[in-house]
Image (spheres, rainbow, N blue to C red):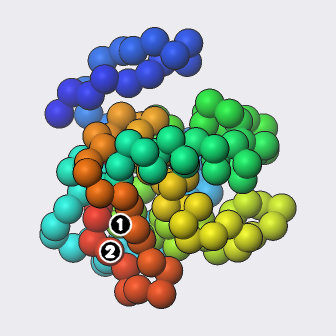
Amino acid sequence: MVRSKRDAGGGRRSVGGRVASAAAAAALFLPVAGALAGERQEGRSVSDGVYSAEQAGRGRREYIQHCATCHSTNLRGGEMAPGLVGDTFLGGWSGQTLWSLFDFSLATMPQDNPGSTSPEAMNAILAYMLRENDFPAGSEALALDPAADGDPITID
């Protein structure tokens, strides 16, 4: 599938497929993603519009409050943390569930106060991240539940 991506200058460029590069940013996420390798279930994917546009707007505000200090305001990361957009990030989570990313993020982020972000805020942050990775919005808000056994929405 060919997908339009944002380049570093905010413009658009055409990208074909995903590149699963072994960059330092992916190294942070691969051990967790690898441990969850058996979790993929058939069903919905992030390409199916699993968040609402309104939720992604709220997610931007939550992201600025909880994440931007380390991951930068443009989600591209920096010296303190990896980027949350692009092929390296998506490649590290490809084939895993969005719930796994949600659960990992709730438990470990923000780095200076792990577990302090509410599930509602994390759902909104993930919606914003999906939008910024050019996945389509849908009609329903993302509503992952940390008490549930996981939702089979796959990251593709």
x and y percentages locating residue 138 in the rendered image: 26, 48
Q: Which mark is residue 125?
A: none
At label 1, counting other C-alpha atoms closer than 10 Å, the crowd grade (few under 14, some 14-19, many 20 or more) is: many
x and y percentages locating residue 139 in the rendered image: 26, 51
Determine the image quadrant of residue 108. bottom right
Q: What residue would you read off at disc 2?
A: 151
Secondary element type, mark 1: loop
Upstream in the sequence, badge 2 or badge 1? 1
Left or right, 42 with reference to 135: left
Amino acid at pointer 1: Thr
At label 2, counting other C-alpha atoms closer than 10 Å, the crowd grade (few under 14, some 14-19, many 20 or more) is: some
Most distant residue in the right direction? 112
x and y percentages locating residue 106 in the rendered image: 61, 70
Q: Nearer the viewer, residue 142 or 74?
A: 142
Residue under the image location 63 percent in, 70 percent down: 118
Q: Which mark is residue 97?
A: 1
Residue under the image location 38 percent in, 86 percent down: 149
Evaluate if marks 2 and 1 touch, with contact meaning CB atoms under 8 Å apart.
Answer: yes
Determine the image quadrant of residue 94. bottom left
Quick check: 155 above or below 137? Answer: below
Left or right, 120 with reference to 149: right
Determine the image quadrant of residue 18. top left
